[in-house]
Amino acid sequence: MTSEVSAVCAFSIDVLKNTLELIKDVDVENDYIQSAHDKCFIARMMNHFRHCQYLNYHGQRSARLSRDQTVHGDSYEKRSVMMKCLAPLLFNAPYEHIHSLHKLYVDSIVNQLDWRTFVQKLNAEMQAFNLLATVLLSVNVGFLAIQSVDDGGGDSLSQVASYLSVISSFGSMLLGVNIARQSYTQGPDMVDNVQAHLQSIVHPKHGLETLAIIYSLPYALLMWGMIFFVLAFFTECFRHSSAVPSVPVSVMALIVLVLIGWSCHTLRDSAECGHSSGSVLMAVKWVKDLPRWILASVVRSVSASR
């Protein structure tokens, strides 16, 4: 082994073990393989190994020693304005996907093992999000069926928040099903098609940010659906209630909120913290410059009218 991270071989350990067992059974006499089937098998395996050595610059000074190592200097460093603006609204989920995609897609090469693992993980996430979105949709329907909530007006804050939660959960389900369908259609072993697809959407400076944002939408919409439902629930809870039920509910909600914030702050890594601070600073700068932009627009419109 030349790397502590990952080998550059395109085969798993099980495949290599099975190949070794098959090679032991090859009929060899006087240093020549006798069977034509064995010759074809050995030739195909050697072709795979030599092609892997060719892609990873075997024998050169700049040889690739791990699958996520770049030899051309390709790296994702500069984030786009769209990424900085959408990441806080998507709960910084695109940053996790963008790093996973750029470890998967290195120097325009997609490893079969990494792609299979990524597809399996992505499908499991989409299935979990679809299940939670379905439960959230059912809960919102039951919440709207309460007579005190649905008073016939349809303009209360609890109803509007519940409507928004339904739309968010429905969008999460649709996107999750679509992403899962795309991954099932491509298949975990169709690396050639995936490589061509990634090559067509990769940006020269910003990499695979568009794909990372798309993969983050089911999770983000599910989170917004939960937030809207919690808003609808607490609005209905405190609208007509007295101080007796409001005090324990408020205290419990505050405790849960503090625990959630503490756990999120503790579990996030330093890279995510840097991304969050950068997004917040950009948002503050945008809000600070907003009056100047509005004033400049008004001045230009007045000048144009004259």
Image: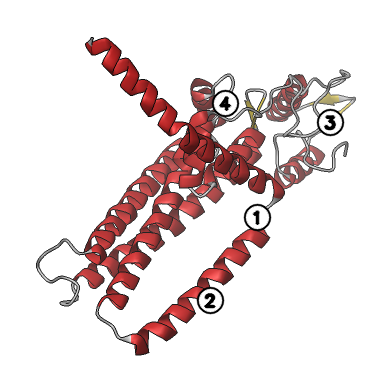
**Circle 2 Cα neighbour tier, 10 Å, few/some/many (<14 / 14–19 / ≥20):** few
SS label for mark 4: loop
Q: CA distance from mark 4 to mark 3?
A: 53 Å
Q: Nearer the viewer, mark 4 or mark 3?
A: 4
Q: CA distance from mark 1 to mark 4?
A: 23 Å
Q: Nearer the viewer, mark 1 or mark 2?
A: 2
Q: Is residue 226 above or below residue 201?
A: below
Which of the marked residues, 3 or 2, is nearer the chain's N terminus? 3
Q: List the residue tagged with mark 2.
A: 255
Q: Amino acid at mark 4?
A: His
**Circle 4 Cα neighbour tier, 10 Å, few/some/many (<14 / 14–19 / ≥20):** some
Q: List the residue tagged with mark 4.
A: 206
Q: List the residue tagged with mark 3.
A: 28
Where's residue 56, x and y in %? Answer: 76, 24
Mark 1 vs 2: CB contact within 8 A: no
Label annotation for residue 95: none
Query: Quadrant where the N terminus lies?
Result: top right
Q: Amino acid at mark 1?
A: Arg
